[in-house]
Amino acid sequence: MAANVTTPGAVEPKMWLGGIEPMKASYGKLMMWFFLISDTFTFSALLVAYGTARFSFPAFTGKHEDFTFSNMYWPVPERVYEAVPFLHGISLPLVFVGIMTFILIASSVTMVLAVEAGHRMDRANVEKYMLWTILGGFTFLGCQAWEWSHFIHGTDSGTVMKVIENGTWIEKTIFGANLTENQYGPPAFADFFFFITGFHGTHVFSGVILNILIFFRAATGFYDKRGSYEMVEKVGLYWHFVDLVWVFVFTFFYLV
Amino acid sequence: MAEVHHHHVHNQDPEAGAEQRKAIWKTFWILLIITSLEFLIAFTVPHGILKITIFIVMTIVKAFYIVGEFMHLKHETKTLIWSILVPVIFVAWLILALMLEGNAIFEAIFG
């Protein structure tokens, strides 16, 4: 805790001299920022690879309503992601992924409200908002599990595609997608879907675990005893970062 | 220790942080409205450079609000802001470089 309090009479920290708190941020907070920058590089690498692959494949050039699945060109994402739970057979492009986006933004709001309550040492509100954030995280993960399951199992009729099997071209009906076959387009499209949303989902999952830990420690009075709720803020940074990554995934994978 | 105690008492004020909470909800509405607009554009604007540009600009605006307000970076010291932003410039360069590279691969195979 001592690190969070500027000692009265201490030398005013200068921009490059550090002092007890370089950049007026505590050690843990600064390290969280630098960790997030390194995580930014990892996610950027995935999205940059996606962009490179997309630009090196032919795009679908026909009229939008004439689009059909084929491994000869990159698919139009809104035609791939148009299923919603309990509404089988109805085309609702991007609706489900929109709901997921809303859930993640809402959980970011409850997280920042927990951080704000922590500044006031308001334990009851920290507990309340952490629970909402945990609920939002689990709901998002549930949605993603459903989306993956639908993507893997595919549509009712599948897609007839020409593929190479054991060195010869054959025609076969492909249902859904895995790492080598993809009914929606080139296999690379499915690979990027699994890797990018999977890596993001893993981050959401570890974020939920951290949020549960924070809730537990707040509820058992750990931060009251310590005299500071700064840990809520540090984990909050991580949770907002997960939301931020989703904003980029949403644009570059689903919209563009 | 006396200073820390004072800190506690001061923060029991229920009005404390009201301004901050207002800013949080304002940010929430901005993010929600931008996301709704993205949906509207996805189904009304024809596919092309204009649409992609609009989406990228809106994404950067959303990122600005999440990082600036939710992650509080806007209110940190200038040195911290720059040490986070400068590395991102290299990422932007990498995106551009490899998109051009992808286009070159496309030209080599299909052009």
Image: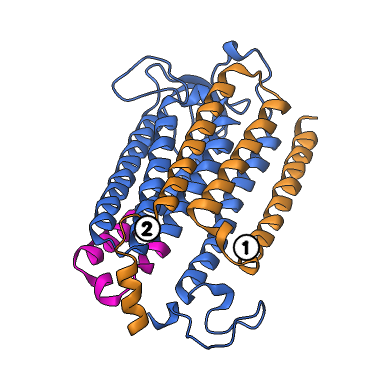
Chain colours: A blue, B orange
Question: Do the residues at discs 2 and 1 belong to one chain?
Answer: yes
Magenta region, main secondary structure: helix
Locate residue B24 relative to residue A209 in the image: left or right: right
Mark 2–mark 1 contact, CB under 8 Å?
Answer: no
Q: Callout 2, which amino acid?
A: Ala
Q: Secondary structure at mark 1?
A: helix
> Residue drawn at (29%, 57%), measured in percent from left and top?
A126
Residue B16 tag number: 2
Q: Nearer the viewer, residue A25 or A248?
A: A25
Residue A170 appears in the figure: no
Q: Earlier in the sequence, mark 2 or mark 1?
A: 2
- The x, y position of residue A77, in whole percent, is 54, 27
Write down the region rendered in magenta: A208-234
Q: Nearer the viewer, residue A179 or B51?
A: B51
Q: Nearer the viewer, residue A196 or A216?
A: A216
Pinpoint the chain carrying mark 2: B
Residue B81 tag number: 1
Q: Quadrant of residue B60?
A: top right
Check residue A119 for magenta coloring.
no
Q: Quadrant of residue A82?
A: top left
- The x, y position of residue A105, in whole percent, is 43, 42
Q: Secondary structure at mark 2?
A: loop
> Residue drawn at (72%, 42%), measured in percent from left and top?
B99
Real-space CA distance between mark 2 and mark 1, rounded to the nearest whole angstrom? 26 Å
Where A225 sits versus B96, above or below? Answer: below
Quarter of the image that includes the C terminus of chain A: top right
Q: Callout 1, which amino acid?
A: Ile
